[in-house]
Amino acid sequence: MMAPASPLDRAFFARRPRRVARELLGKVLVRREHGGPILAARIVEVEAYLGEQDPAAHAAAGKTLRNAVLFGPPGHAYVYFIYGSHYCLNVSCEPEGRAGCVLFRAAEPLSGVERMAQFRGIELQGPQDWRKLTSGPGRLCQAFAITRARDNGCDLTSPASSLWIGDDGFSPRGIVLTPRIGIVKATDQPLRYLLHGNRFVSGLKRPSKL
DNA sequence: ATATCGATTATCT
DNA sequence: GATAATCGATATG
């Protein structure tokens, strides 16, 4: 069962993206739905984006309508739409005015699994199928019913929000750094953080190689 | 088990 | 008009 989680405060996010990314591993993403079950999943893979000086970041070209949340206060959700069908979730980092952020790439379901399957439009045959729920940034958003219209700008530090991030005391071990994936610029820097051997990490169908 | 490919649309230049 | 921080299907060894 899930231990009670306490929200992360604003100061947690008001730091550089690398630090926030590393420390977000093991934390819990929580979705409260009106009249639905609580959805919760432990964060097992994230990527840091460094803001305006990072060629791969959405903030690289400066502030636009789309990425405005990144330039606002830390701890808020930046949700964008990509490839005509997927949403991806980020959290704004650094003090207001600086556009660093962290992308949520994968999580391990803790509760509300059947509801997640519903949102994903799949039927679960067994625990091995849980991987299809939240392994990948697009899947994770679909499992949590995250959209830009609903969640962009949401305060992720407040349990009053429908979407927020909590700490349930879990201490992750075996943090691995790799280059970011799915991008073409700045692929040399190791800015992807994941939990060693965790089966919910995205990418390979079977994470045999970690 | 790994590689390649097409879908689909908000956003920006 | 071009692009894209993905996914799922198909092909191939």
Image (tube, coloured by chain):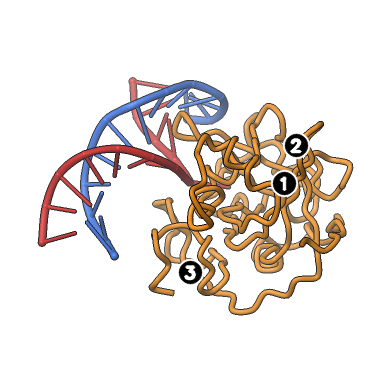
Chain colours: A orange, B blue, C red
- Residue C12 coordinates in the image, percent (x, y): 11, 52
**Which of the image's four quarters has the C terminus of chain A?**
bottom left
Q: Is residue A141 visible in this depiction of the protein?
A: yes
Q: Which of pointers 2 and 3 lies earlier in the amino acid sequence?
A: 2
Secondary element type, mark 2: loop
Q: Nearer the viewer, mark 1 or mark 3?
A: 1
Label ID, residue A153: 2
User: Which residue is denoted by mark 3 in the rendering?
Assistant: A178
Amino acid type of the residue tagged 2 in the rendering? Gly
Does residue A27 appear left or right of residue A117 in this picture?
Answer: right
User: Which residue is denoted by mark 1 in the rendering?
Assistant: A39
Secondary element type, mark 1: strand
Real-space CA distance between mark 2 and mark 3, rounded to the nearest whole angstrom: 28 Å
Labels 1 and 3 touching (C-beta < 8 A): no
Real-space CA distance between mark 1 and mark 3, rounded to the nearest whole angstrom: 28 Å
Q: Residue furthest front?
A: A125
**Which of the image's four quarters has the N terminus of chain A?**
bottom right
Q: Which of pointers 1 and 3 lies earlier in the amino acid sequence?
A: 1
Amino acid type of the residue tagged 3 in the rendering? Thr
Instruction: Please state the chain letter of the residue tagged with numbered disc 1 in the rendered image.
Output: A
- Residue A131 coordinates in the image, percent (x, y): 51, 54
Labels 2 and 3 touching (C-beta < 8 A): no
Real-space CA distance between mark 2 and mark 1, rounded to the nearest whole angstrom: 20 Å
